[in-house]
Amino acid sequence: MITRRQFFGFARYAERMAARRAQLVLLLRYEPAHYDHPLSDEAAKRLQAAFSRGVRIRLASDSARLADQFERLYGLPVEVLPIPHTGRLTATAVPSAEGRPLHVVSLGNARDEKGLLDLFDVVRILHLRGDLDRFRFSFQVNDPTPLLVPAITQFAAERHAAVRLIHAPLESEAYYGLLQDADIVALPYWRSIYEARTSGVLLEALAAAKPVICTADTWMSDQVEATGAGRVAPDRNPTALALALMECARDYERHAAQAAAAAGSWVATHNPQSFAAALINGAAARPRARKLHAAVLYPWGDGLQRSSGASQRVNSLIDLLAETAAEVRVLQDTRHPPVRRGNVVWEATPVLERASADPARQAQARRWAALGVKNDEDIYLRLADAAAHDAGLAARIDHLVRSSDIVFVEYPFWAPLVAAAARRHGRPWVVTAHDILSDQVKRSPAWLRWATRRMELAGLRAADHVATLSVEDAQRLTAWGVPAEPIEVGLDTAAMRPLPADVRPLVDALCGLPADDLPLLLFVGSRYGPNQRAAEALRAMAPSLRARRALSWSAPAPSLRPAAPSPRWARWMNSPCGCFTRPPPWFWRRWRRARALRSRRSTLWALARPC
């Protein structure tokens, strides 16, 4: 097992091994984040170069999960070696659980990532439920981390008769004696650290045929579920951990029998002899049918809230990926700690916030304002410029690209950084053009529209694939030399609830409108600028409609109740509602053409097209 500094030293040594017949085997047992350092990146480059020259280099781990992660990270094959378990304890006859409390143990020194606080809470939960007499607990709490000292002191003061706290380190004989006396071994280790890492305590427990309670979706849970020797519980969830313990106790004989049946094959695989054989001759090939690891880069900050059309669309993509991927990591432009939802991890980095505090970026914004930029229409260039000058974002993107199998990029603002990382690590990537961004520059000088178009086309051309949300956008991009494929946004029909045949009372109730028979024109959209301008245009036309109107993006607008409409308008108003989920491409062209007619009635006919 080597550290990141030793990793770099061995890489330098490997460069001088070309003339030798010896082989170098590097055992990596820490999670990849431990090696997330420029020294490790340089070491990987040197190892790849030496490997391509025929130097006999082997990377190895004792965890299949770690091996997969390191293969994606460094682009070199990684073997999975057996663990050289010494066989100190062997399986014994399955004990009966009748008429006695089950002995639950937590072994090893006291560190917060071992879930000791969760075990304290489990004891409290069982005490409140009246089930504590079904168990007795032995917790090693020696050498605690500073943060755990007050919690251990407080728990000891509660004086639970069924709990024994072991404050002194155990000698080998006492350690194995405690393990031999155990009925269940509790390993509620934090997934953030032990998702892929192995555990010596788990190894000892399975070899001794002890049922185990461990954290779900970890290397430990892979072993427990494969043998049936115990139960798994969600990460950092004392209530679920207590329930898993109760379930294991209810069916203890079955779990103990499965643990005893699996112990023989477990020890036959993980022992010093098999480790030495794999070290000399190479480890046996492991199944390579692993799931996809995907990254999604979203340059706004509302992904978790789903508060805009873009965030709804990207969440639909993430939900689809999460069904089949091992993990989906999302990076968005805001500030919050990492949020895990199932196999989706949301990360954040405040790109625009950092740029706004940069004096150089502030001066640039003032220069652009002096050149006639209006309505914040330089936002797209500012987003791209902020990304180009953000070293922190570049490092985050490089790490995400390197550890993923495919990368999805929303909008072209971060495309140059992704393109550079994808070239370095050989990863495919896709960028989605939600709009033609330069078309949104309407009231500012022509140079800003030209610069915005140049930025977005450069970002789109660098991608392996480009997707658009409309056929028209795909055709225009293709004509400009950017092959694009339209993937139109559809409705999630599975999430739609059946509506009554007459939806008018429902609409009146939702919008706070009086119940009457006047025709209704409903505009639905977000607070996106073009949507708000469209709503303003329709509001200006309202008097000529002679109908009641409700405009709504995040809240309903006031209703309007003029006189009854003419038969001509009634025919249109009684047809299916004219509904714009967002202004289509033809909207503003028809609006400008209709305004020239100087007629409100003609204006409406030019705009309205029932959906």
Image: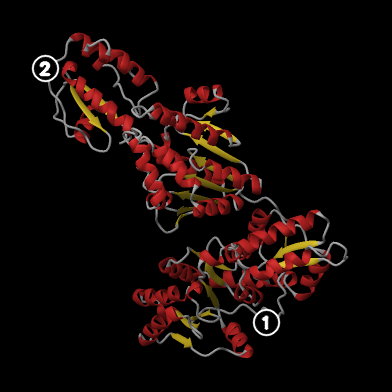
Q: Is residue 219 visible?
A: yes
Q: Quadrant of residue 83?
A: bottom right
Q: CA distance from mark 1 to mark 2?
A: 91 Å
The residue that label 2 is drawn on is 563
Can residue 326 be spotted in the picture?
no
Q: Residue at x 78, y 57 (%)?
A: 51
Mark closer to the chain start, 1 or 2:
1
Residue 398 placement, left or right of 63: left
Q: Nearer the viewer, mark 1 or mark 2?
A: 2
Residue 297 x, y percent position in the rendering = 50, 45
At 19% from the left and 17% from the top, the residue drawn is 545
Find disc 1 in the rendering and name its residue: 89
Total residue callouts? 2
Pick whichever, 369 or 1, lies toward us.
Answer: 369
Image quadrant for the C terminus? top left
Question: With respect to residue 7, does 309 lie above or below?
Answer: above
Give the amino acid type for the residue marked by disc 1 in the picture.
Leu
Q: Amino acid at mark 2?
A: Ala
Where residue 437 sits in the image (x, y, percent)?
43, 31
The answer to which of 546 and 359 lies nearer the viewer is: 359
Q: Nearer the viewer, residue 121 or 471?
A: 471
Q: Outermost residue, left direction?
A: 563
Give x and y (percent) for residue 552.
25, 33
